[in-house]
Image (spheres, grey):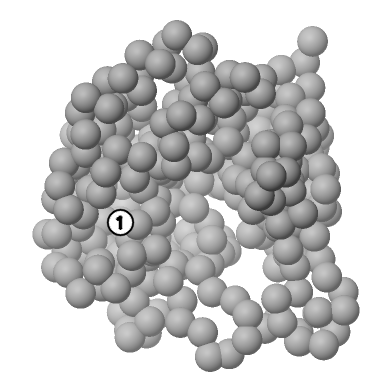
Amino acid sequence: MHLGFLSAAVADIDKAARLGFDGLELQADAFGRADVAALDADAIAQARAQCRERGVTISALAYYDVAFRSAVFNAAEPAFVHDVYERVFDAAERLGVQTVASMSGFDAARDWDGNLRLFADRFGPVARRAEQRGLRLAFENWMGFGGRLPFRPVNMGGSPDTWDAWFAAVPSPAIGIEFDPSHLAWQGIDHLRALAEYRDRVYHVHAKDVELLAERRYRGGVNGNAFRFRIPGYGMIAWAPFIAALREIGYDGGVAIEHEDAVFSHDRFDEGLVRGRQVLGPLIHPV
């Protein structure tokens, strides 16, 4: 396994090495906007060379725009989505990366069944192309909504029922999960059981912890922002059993810290990364 963190900047290849990481999950937006044009081939080549020099492995190329630019994608035809992912796949191949981390997206103007049809229309052709190119798509298990009503979801994927629906809608081995235990733990879903049951579909891993906020849960219930994300080791997840479970299922891919911890933000951001590495490093790379 490679231990890294999620980043949107090529410069973080150097940071990863300096802070003691041997991996990095890099966002495709670091090389341009795939929904507009092909990604910068020269910058991609430079990044690959930089990784070789610094001993850092890019474990996944992340493309989450289908959720975070939902207005663009929800107004577009599935053929547009196919063309965009072709550009992302081109970049992944140039980087020597097999896994493209992604979001499923969600159109709040459609009901649940309508969104499953949308998922099939969008990602059926994309999955076939990924198979042809020897690539894999890892959809993050983020449900894409929360807080006070009314809210408009931008993503689906928060539970095993949804994953089953994905795999039924697009029955392709190219489709898998970017497994983040934090999105399960706050819901009360057994993340170790889910990891074991979907072992063959776990294509990338996010390391993010979560802290339950009892007062907010009491005051606002499930719509009350009753949790906050933390650096690994500073929330409710037991990381030794989780890493042991990854070993047990034979997982040997990337584990990327997704740093969304407000306590270690701004000028303490790198401190948060180091604290996370100090928790996970001995478990992943024991000395």
Query: Could you tell me which residue is drawn at 62 percent across and 27 percent down?
Result: 3
Residue 2, percent across and down?
58, 23
Per the image, the residue denoted by label 1 is 170
Of 70 and 191, the residue lying toward us: 70
Q: Residue at horizontal 27%, vertical 20%?
A: 45
Left or right, 163 with respect to 42, comes to: right
Give the crowd class for mark 1: few <14, some 14-19, many >=20 residues within 10 Å: many
Establish if 31 lies above or below 117: above
- What residue lies at 64% left-to-right and 59% top-to-bottom? 183
* Residue 207 picture location, percent across and down: 65, 42
Examine the rendered structure and indicate whether residue 253 appears above or below residue 53: below
Amino acid type, callout 1? Val
Q: Position of residue 244 (x, y in %)?
A: 75, 31
State the quadrant of the C terminus.
top right
Please tell me which residue lies in front, 200 or 204: 204
The kind of secondary structure element at disc 1 is loop
For this orientation, the residue located farthest to the front is 267
The quarter holding residue 280 reads top right
